[in-house]
Image (cartoon, grey):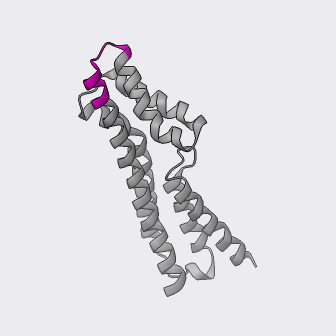
Amino acid sequence: MIDILLLVAAILCLLIGFVGCLIPMLPGPPAAWVALPLLKFTHWGDGMLWPWIVVFAALALIVTVLDYWAPAWGVKKLGGTRAGTWGATAGLIVGLFFLPMGIILGPFLGALLGELLTGTPGKNSLKSALGAFIGFLFGTGLKFISCTWIAFYFILCLFLY
């Protein structure tokens, strides 16, 4: 009975992980990672190896940090200023209140507004905002890839061992 409860909880964690790839309020990869130790404590997880669980924990942590850093990095890479970086961060926070489009448009509009308010010409401001958007896509892609790898290992251990 406890095995089934742990398995259901693990599957829910995987699902929350994938939803968290798009919604920054949910910690996508860390939530998906929690599924691995939950499965390990069931009879289905006998074939799981702790070193792999630790590797996936490190992956989830690194990807989570990169996800918050990526929009600011994109702003800087495309010539944005500190105002654009702060604007992208503020836009992400404000965008949380306007899900789901706010998460996509927030960093873009925040970087654009930050650049325009400091007197950066329109073309350069738009370029900076594009960097924030590219950074957001990069972070989202990394989260999705890491959650997919975690899910793959989960399914592999669940059905093959």
In the rendered view, does 96 fall on the left or right side of 147?
right
Number of marks drawn: 0
The percent coordinates of residue 11 (x first, y second) are 61, 69
The picture places residue 112, in percent across and down from the top left corner, at 37, 26
Residue 145 shows in the view: yes
| Quarter containing the N terminus | bottom right
* Range shown magenta: 117-127
Whether residue 58 is visible, yes or no, is no
- Is 3 within the magenta? no
- x and y percentages locating residue 34 in the rendered image: 56, 61
Residue 35, percent from left and from top:
57, 66
The question of residue 123 being in magenta is answered with yes
* Nearer to me, 93 or 3: 93
- Residue occupying the point 52% across, 59% down: 18
Camera-nearest residue between 135 and 34: 135
Q: Is residue 33 left or right of residue 134?
A: right
Residue depicted at 54% across the width and 50% down the height: 27
In depth, the one of 152 and 131 nearer the eye is 131
Q: 75 or 154, which is in the foreground? A: 75
Name the main secondary structure of what is drawn in magenta. helix
